[in-house]
Amino acid sequence: MAVTYRTLWTAGPGRAEVSALDSGAQAVEALCAVPLPEGTRLAGGMDDGRVRIWDPVTGEETRVLGDQRSAVFALCAVPVPEGVLLAVGGANGTVELWDPRTGERSPRTVPGHDGRLVNGLCAVPLGDRVLLASGGDDGTVRLWDLAAGRQLHVFDAGTEPFDGAHPVRGLCALAVDGRAVVAAGGDDGTIRLWDAVTGRPVRELVGRPDPTRGATCVLYRPGYVPVDSVGHTGPVYTLCVVSLDGRTVLASGGDDGTIRLWDPGSGDVLRRLGPGRGGTYGVCEVRAGDRTLLAGVGGGDYGLRLWDPGTGELVRVFEGHTGPVWGGVCALPLPDRALLASGGGKFDGMVRLWDPAAEPPACPGLRESFDTLCAVPLGDRTLMASGSTNGAVRLWDAETGSRTDVLDREERDYTGDWVGGVCALPVGGRPVLAAVSRNGSVRLHDPVAGEDIRVIGRTPQDPSAWVRTAEGELVSEAFTAVCPVPQEGRQLLATCGEPLLGDVANVRLWNPETGEHLRTVARHKGKLRAMCAITLPEHTLLACVGWDSYVWLWHTTGDDHPAALVGHSGWVNAVCAVPVDGRTLLASGSHDGTVRLWDLATGRTEQVLRGHQDWVRGLSLLSLGGRTVLASGGKDRWVRLWDLEEFRCVAKIPVHSPVSALAAAGDRLLVATSGGLLALAVGG
């Protein structure tokens, strides 16, 4: 089956990056530029233990170093007589050395930090040789001569004894008054400088503890006197050198969300930039045209900020990551310009390249994470409904992407009004959109009239409006899913969710015409996150899945014990009914990366569809050339189309961000991601 597809429209933030490189991992933990004779390469360290090397000009992945083992937290390119070695440090407590051109591991070994995590690495030029500095969870900074294969110094980071409770984070080499100096930032908010030749302390750039952090702050030495310092008020995560008016300045970023510029000779703070939202996890200097700028990334607003270090002006902000930027930022000098690379953490996992001289898009677009979708048939046309983690519910024209806001939200981030599920059903002869929220409400909306019919349960305007069930209990759960249930010639509404009180989640049936709770179908110990109704000749079942590896089946009458379908090895995230050869099977998608097709008569797995490299989050049926295919979308940023006659993948569609939901109407497929919506016309 030959499959074609084209983009109809997109909705989400404007694309500001030059390119996005797929790390193949959940999180990027470290980045560095690697100068090679053939050009600058970009190295990225991942949470799965791999190091990937890309050509930033073409986006081609040229090498993958290592295999799946402990996470990589630090990278550094170190010049050696025979070329360049890439130093790799991380959770395994050692520093590995690799040849980035051949992909071979060097026989040279740096023992590391007594088995503790290695958090920082930097090259230290010293005359005609280059040393390597490493900082770790043991509270020390160690200086290594790679050519001689020996350790030269162990610097005391001020956290004696070295108990691993107060790790060294950022490292940087710089020249101070003609001396080669190593700077290190730690959990106590202090930056310490040592002479790389003698190993003696040079100076401390003193921070001040944040009293709200409690025991996470440093355990101070005897005789320490707290002062009202202008330094950081929490851990220092990142350091870099900045040239400012012909002199060397040290830039630091910390947990307090600020970037501070220091005179390393005097110890004075020259400027304070920020604060931003969340911590600052990476800083670096970059040339943008004829200007020197300072780039900073962090965990709160997902953006990359560019500052003028001389004036303190925030020059521009680039947005595009869909999660915290844990992997830091580094400059990539290219023949015609310099680029910036930033590494996305959990929920993103992408390396994004930016032109620091470019202007961000004039229209930023919607910046919210879409979490649930459904098709809403309206006679001769179809709308698509979306629900977002910020509480917004929106309707979209499937062909044009024109938007109507059912419930608008200005917030970008997750809120207590997170929309858990949306579905369409006929009520009283008219189409109705149902949307359920984690705030405990069920909203019924008429998409033709553009008005709400009713809201059942709690709302932000009336948080005390608890509903009593038919059994006389209060409805006290965060709704995470909703679906229509045909029964006795009418459409009912089913919901499930997560318990707000206790540990029992309820599966409930509602009358959408009156808003009345009809019955509690099931009480489930644990959290449920997705559901669908399965209409069989003799009865209707509800399939629910959540924070375990089972698919749970209940009769809608609620008068029997559940059946559990066993086979997945991870949480189950999505379910849908699938017609195959005149039978109705159930499809389920899981954290284990598989899609399973279940025979409901026997409770056994009929087929296992493999191909996704990470969580499967969305499932939907799609009409393709007169045949029904199953679409699946995953955290691996791929949508796969499966032939239900031959049970094979007939198409792979790459998307920009992890997939959170799918919905289809005929041959139109809507893909929801943490970064926006993508509408596709699929042919075959």
Image (cartoon, rainbow, N blue to C red):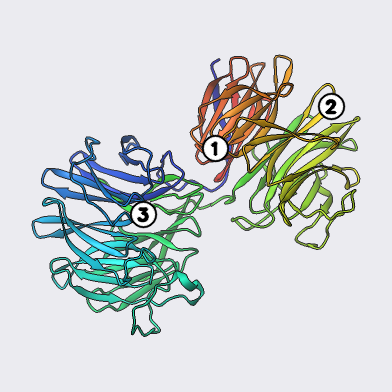
Residue 465 or 411: which is nearer the viewer? 465
From this viewpoint, is residue 333 visible?
no
Crowding at mark 2 (Cα within 10 Å: few <14, some 14-19, many 20+): few
Residue 615 - label: 1
- Residue 244 percent location from the top left of the image: 26, 68
Discs 3/1, front: 1
Q: Quadrant of residue 58?
A: top left
Residue under the point 22% across and 76% down: 265
Q: Secondary structure at mark 1?
A: loop
**Image position of 103 (left or right of 488):** left
- Residue 107 percent location from the top left of the image: 18, 41
Residue 99 or 598: which is nearer the viewer? 598
Return the residue at label 2.
539
Residue 65 - label: none
Q: Secondary structure at mark 2?
A: loop
Q: Amino acid at mark 1?
A: Trp
Q: Considering only order in the chain, which callout, 1 or 3, is on the residue closer to the N terminus?
A: 3
Crowding at mark 3 (Cα within 10 Å: few <14, some 14-19, many 20+): many
- Residue 71 percent location from the top left of the image: 38, 47
Using the image, determine if residue 400 lies above or below residue 310. Answer: above
Using the image, determine if residue 190 lies above or below residue 390. Answer: below
**Picture quarter with the C terminus:** top right
- Residue 122 percent location from the top left of the image: 25, 57
Q: Considering only order in the chain, which callout, 2 or 3, is on the residue closer to the N terminus?
A: 3
Spatial CA distance of label 3 from label 1 is 27 Å
* CB contact under 8 Å: marks 3 and 1: no
